[in-house]
Image: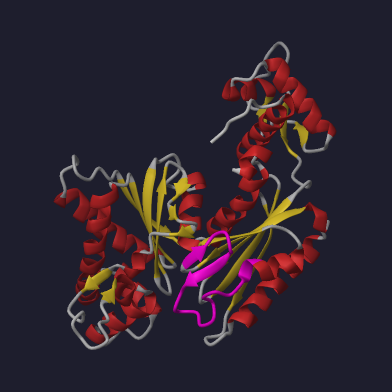
Amino acid sequence: MNSYPLRSREIRQANEKMILKIMHRTKTISQSEVALRTGLQASTVFRIFRSLEQRNLIQEVELQKNGPERKGRKPAYYSVNQHVAYAVGIDISSYGATLLLFDFSGTTVEEKTVSFAKNVSIKEMSSTIIELIDMSLKSVEIDREALLGIGIGAPGIVDIQKGEVVRYARFPGMEGYPLKHKIEERFEVPVYVHNNTSVIALSEHRYGRAQGKNSLIAFLIRAGVGGAYIDRGRIFESQGKTAFEAGHIAVDLSKASSPDNEMMTLEDYMAEDAILKAVQARVKKIHNWDDLLFHLEKRDEEVLKAMNQLVDILLGAVRNIALLLNPEVILIISRFRALSQFMAEAVDTYISSSFDPKCIDTHKVIPLQYDPVIACKGAADFVFDDFFKTDQEQQN
């Protein structure tokens, strides 16, 4: 591969994008702090700040004073102009969709959620999402030209370049549906589609309880069981498609010799409906998720016994994945705080008591209740991350 010297314009653009990205992440910062972080000369930082301010991309802000005033010249602090650009983040599951509209500072300015009917078609789902985006943009009254793009976290294996779900059996018609194309055609902005568990895991790595960790694996227990692996801030993917479909790991080979050769997978046992059905079969007083969660929080012995049988299946999958990847952190995510807590405690006990740290050095097992803000923020970050790329990075 041939490499050519960067021209001054490309260097200037790269430095501007780098500084804008830092300001987008840190909210408020001074020129001297930027110089320290980037290693750029103070005069270079000054020129870039002046250019960005003239183009209305950043603005000087006043910080709230705490404590006695210092003598001498006070540093000027700047932030990005939050009204100059916007991004949409959407999280989709078979239950419904959540949409958040973010301004250029990453602040939520609009939030909408919709539930899907049980037998909703993919065309109806697509139309509903387009309607949600339309309503959000009209509600905030932003200029369409200020919309940078739309990020979507979708269930299943996703072809990232095509923006299509390659495999997801729980939503008939979703596989191969041109979701990216349909939404780009309607709004004429870039659309980025990725696996929803990966999107949530990346967002937790950047902003949540896994912030600053080098590597993590995540399990999302919802209509199915999603999986994600983050290594040094990057989502693991393969050949242009999202990978790490943990829910499809075979955990019961007893049916492998049956006529249909159907092996039972992790999500056959650990998806929400499967958990509830299994506990109901063993504990007659459990009629719905409210009952199950109530008795789980009360540490009901009968419920705990039924849940522990299911957890053993999860532990088998965690064991194999942890031995392969040795993650620093494991995230257990579900819609229910009590369920996440119970599963995480079981995994943490198993990891700490069963493995030599020389083999598996997992520092934390973190329970997380699904948060649509985190999910949508991660999806919108694909838009912002692409915006902050230089022309050369875009081409590579």
Total marks drawn?
Answer: 0
Q: Is residue 150 left or right of residue 210?
A: right
Depth check, front residue: 62 or 348: 348
* Residue 134 in which image quadrant: bottom right
Instruction: Please identify the residue farthest to the top as the structure is shown.
Output: 72
Q: Is residue 22 left or right of residue 359?
A: right
* Residue 392 in which image quadrant: top right
- Way the structure is coloured: secondary structure
Q: Kindly identify the residue that appears in the image at 46 percent across and 74 percent down.
A: 168
340 within the magenta span: no
Q: Kindly identify the residue that appears in the image at 65 percent across and 41 percent down.
A: 388
Q: Is residue 1 above or below residue 260?
A: above
> Could you say where residue 241 lies in the image, as x and y percent from the top left?
48, 60
164 within the magenta span: yes
Q: Is residue 195 above or below residue 353?
A: below
Q: Is residue 273 left or right of residue 86?
A: left
Magenta-highlighted residues: 157-180
Depth check, front residue: 123 or 207: 123
Report if residue 199 is visible in the image. Answer: yes
Report if residue 75 is visible in the image. Answer: no
In the picture, which quadrant includes the C terminus? Answer: top right
> Could you say where residue 259 lies in the image, as x and y percent from the top left?
23, 88
> Could you say where residue 208 lies in the image, as x and y percent from the top left?
48, 48
Q: Is residue 2 left or right of residue 364?
A: right
